[in-house]
Structure formats: C-alpha cells, structure tokens
Image: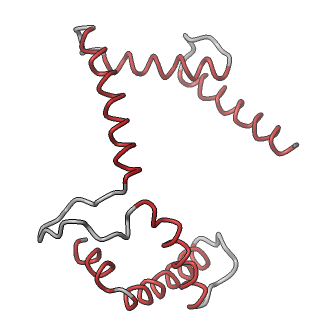
Amino acid sequence: MDFIIRTIVRGGVGAFFFFSWILQLLWNGILVDQLALVAVKVNYWQAAALWFFVTILTAWMGIARRPRILIPNFRYRVFGDIARTVKREVRSRLGDWAQEESRDADLSDLGDRIESKIKRGLAKWVGTDEDVEWDDLGEQIERRIKEKLRDWADE
C-alpha cells in the first residue's frame, strides 16, 4: 500500500495517466461487461476526465495531499482540518456517553442496553410497540420504507 501511495504522490502526471488507464479498464471490464450496470463503455480520455473530476471533488478530504512530515515508515494518513474536527467531536461525544455508562457501574449488559435503545428508536420511527420482536420490526421497517419511496415517487 505504501508503494501505491508513494507512486501516486510522487508520480505526478505519469501516475495520473496510468491510473486513468486503470480506471478505464475497471469501468469497461466490471461495470459494463460483468455487472451490466452501465451500457456505455468509456474511452481513455473520458476515463481521464472522470479521474480528474474525482480528484478535484475529493481533494478537500486530504487523500491526495502529501504528508506534512516525511517519515520513512509513515503509516497514518494525514487528514484535513475537517476530518480532525469530526474526529475530535466524535471522541468527545463518545467519551461523555462512556462516562455516563461507567457511572451506572455494571457494564456487563451494555450490549443489551444498546440493542434496546436501537430497537426503541426504530419502533418509534415506524410507530409500533417497543416490545415487538426483531422479525416483526424488520417487516414494519420494510413496509415504512416502501411507503416513503412510493410517496417520494408520486411527488
């Protein structure tokens, strides 16, 4: 994986055209021939344009950026400021929740409590009783999703 990342980061223009060719092969071989999801094959220049637009659209995530500190065995991806903010926010929220749970002392039934919270939330969403079995709840969720899709398609 390090070799591929170094090739992309240091390869520049050559790597761009190489991966455009790889994208063309994958698109035509998998999406068109194997899965038949798309009926149109792309040529090399269309694949290059697609690769270029994907690069532009994902550049804000920091995937294609070079690490700030070049360490020989650098194994961690450097994310942008948005990813750091999200990571910090998730840790603080989960940390608060874990502290609340640890105050309740016994953590042996933590999985059951999480499952019951999820089940209560889903039951509330479909408008049914909280004590319903998972199979019945699954059918009601499926029915609710189909209703919402029908409503959305009718609009």
Q: Which residue is at the far left? A: 72
Choose top left, top right, bottom left or bottom right for residue 47. bottom right
The correct choice, above or below, for 34 with respect to 60 in the image is below
Q: Looking at the picture, how far across and down is residue 103, in whole percent?
A: 25, 9
> What colouring style does the render use?
secondary structure
Choose top left, top right, bottom left or bottom right for residue 31. bottom right
The correct choice, above or below, for 4 with respect to 69 in the image is below
Residue drawn at (70%, 77%) of the image: 39
Query: From the image, which quarter does the N terminus lie in?
Result: bottom left
Q: Looking at the picture, how far across and down is residue 98, in whole percent?
A: 29, 21
Choose between 124 and 4: the one closer to the eye. Answer: 4
Residue drawn at (25%, 78%) of the image: 6
Q: Looking at the picture, how far across and down is residue 75, in whole percent?
A: 19, 62
Q: Which residue is at the far right? A: 154
Q: Is residue 16 left or right of residue 108?
A: right
Residue drawn at (62%, 17%) of the image: 124
Q: Is residue 2 left or right of residue 111?
A: left
Residue drawn at (43%, 83%) of the image: 19
Query: From the image, which quarter does the C terminus lie in?
Result: top right
Choose between 15 and 110: the one closer to the eye. Answer: 15
Q: Is residue 67 left or right of residue 70?
A: right
Count every numbered label the image shows and give the total: 0
The correct choice, above or below, for 99 with respect to 92 in the image is above
Choose top left, top right, bottom left or bottom right for residue 41. bottom right
The correct choice, above or below, for 54 with respect to 61 in the image is below
Q: Looking at the picture, how far across and down is residue 92, in whole percent?
A: 32, 30
